[in-house]
Amino acid sequence: MSLKRTTALVSFALLLFMLSAFLVFYYTLFRRSFHNMEAAHLEQHLRGLQHSLDVDFRHLDSVAADYASWDLTYDYMVSHNSRYVTSELSDDSLSSLNVHLFMLLDRDANIELLKAIGDRPRSLSAAELKRIAFAASKLARNNVEGGITGVVETSTAPLLISIRPILTSRNEGPPRGSLVLARLVDRKFLSDISATLEAPVHLVDLRDVPGSSGLDLQTSGGMPNSISIEENTAEIYLVLRDLELRPISAVKVSMSRKMWHEGEKNQLWALAILALLGVARTCFNLAFIQRRVVSRIAKLSEMTAEIDRTGDLSRRAQDFGSDEIGQLAASMNQMLAKLHVTQNTLIGTRERLELEASHDPLTGAFNRRAGLERIEQELSRCRRDRRTLALFILDIDQFKSINDSFGHGGGDAVLIGISTALTNTLRPFDTLIRAGGDEFIIVTPGTGHLDARHLGDRLMTRLHATVIEWQQAHLKVTASIGCACCSGELSPDELIALADRALYRAKAKGRDCFESEDFNSNMMTGTLNTDLNSNSCPI
């Protein structure tokens, strides 16, 4: 069979294979990816629903915190001054804050003051109010810092609850009972969330949540949120939990799937057009292919593609004859041989230049420019992996006197000896940087404040044991070390400045000691906080 016929048969066979691959790709990957996009879209709305509820909880807790740390509220629990109720707890002021129930409880869970806004909160029975007061007082005793939020089921509608201990305006005690604020999960509440999500939101029973049958509802936190996808609609269920994290009801968001059905139709049309274009391209290529050219050119093309993919310039074209294609293959082999020699030369030069550009020629440590880039990379990895990082700044004590006494050669020997001692103490993936002069920076990823202190002690111990020989002299040098820890919240300059602060303290204590700083990223104020506890300096 001629090469042309063989090429034609193979081309049509490949065309059929391509069409089959298109279908397999569509049903196994593309269509699944499209459905994953829809699921991600629904999960985004679920997160939006959760965010809306969190915003309401935070708002309610913020109002509760203001009232609970108000001196007038603190004094009322002693004097029961009626002016506090009439002037400070009007219906309009509480309603403007979306507060439907205001309760002050003494330490024995007795209701000292009850303020209900609206008909539905006023219809709560005495037993329900007593149950709410008892649960709130119990939780407040176990958590004097306050900030307890949750949902309480009542006969009228669920209530968003916030509980705070009653303290002075300086958040000082002793607590004089507890404050309870509540907001109804009513039609207005749900309509506000519907407007945010641009989808209808309803309150449903737990039995209507998919997968809830047979669930022990007394088990704390036992029910997950869920997404139900039907033919024409998709429903999102967010489970509401009480103050003890037990599921009590759910919020449902209903969304139409019309947009996604239209998208699937468009996908099918796009695949059909791609298939037709593939057939047309195959026929056009066959009209141009000449006998005894296709396979040989294909081999050259495969070889060049492989070289482009792997960068392996040692490959050579083989057995291509003496015609024009063979001459082309021979020319390519000669060109590849020259390129291979040039590539090896460039690789060696590049490696040498990269080493010189990023490392200190005396100590072999990273130089300052490359070190700052490495610090930025490690901080980014900390933010991504949610890990901690420690940065040490080491300054050799009295280095100028060493240079004055032993010359720059002695100073260089000290720098090399200190660098070697530090490298032998650190882990393989830690980074040693010579920041300039006699100052070194050490970056240790995955190191918390306590581990950083232990490492600082080991560094000090290693330096004390290091003896540097120079021209028959045995030099023992000391160093001051400052350390800072964070979880990726700081920039390189801020982290270095924090460690520098610790280094200044170490020098102020007489040098030859280790001091540390710690950045606390979980402070509600969002301000930089330093841990002033540090290791004592050696005598």
Image (cartoon, rainbow, N blue to C red):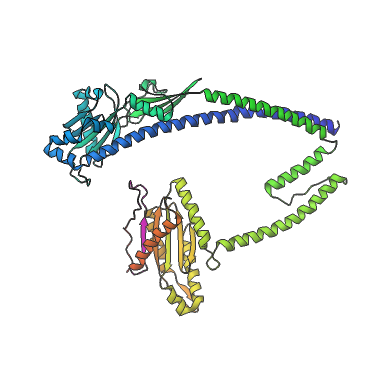
The image shows residue 498 at horizontal and vertical percentages of: 39, 58
Quarter holding residue 324: top right
* Relative horizontal placement of residue 309, taking residue 519 as reference (left or right): right
Query: How many badges with numbers are in the image?
Result: 0
Could you tell me which residue is drawn at 24 percent across and 22 percent down? Answer: 119
* Relative horizontal placement of residue 272, taking residue 491 as reference (left or right): right
The image shows residue 74 at horizontal and vertical percentages of: 17, 41
Q: Residue furthest left?
A: 79
Q: Which quadrant, please, contains the C terminus?
A: bottom left
The image shows residue 274 at horizontal and vertical percentages of: 68, 29
Magenta residue check for 524: yes
Q: Is residue 497 visible?
A: yes
Depth check, front residue: 170 or 492: 170
Could you tell me which residue is drawn at 49 percent across and 76 percent down? Answer: 410
What is the span of residues highlighted in magenta in the rendered image?
509-528
Q: Is residue 281 above or below residue 481?
A: above
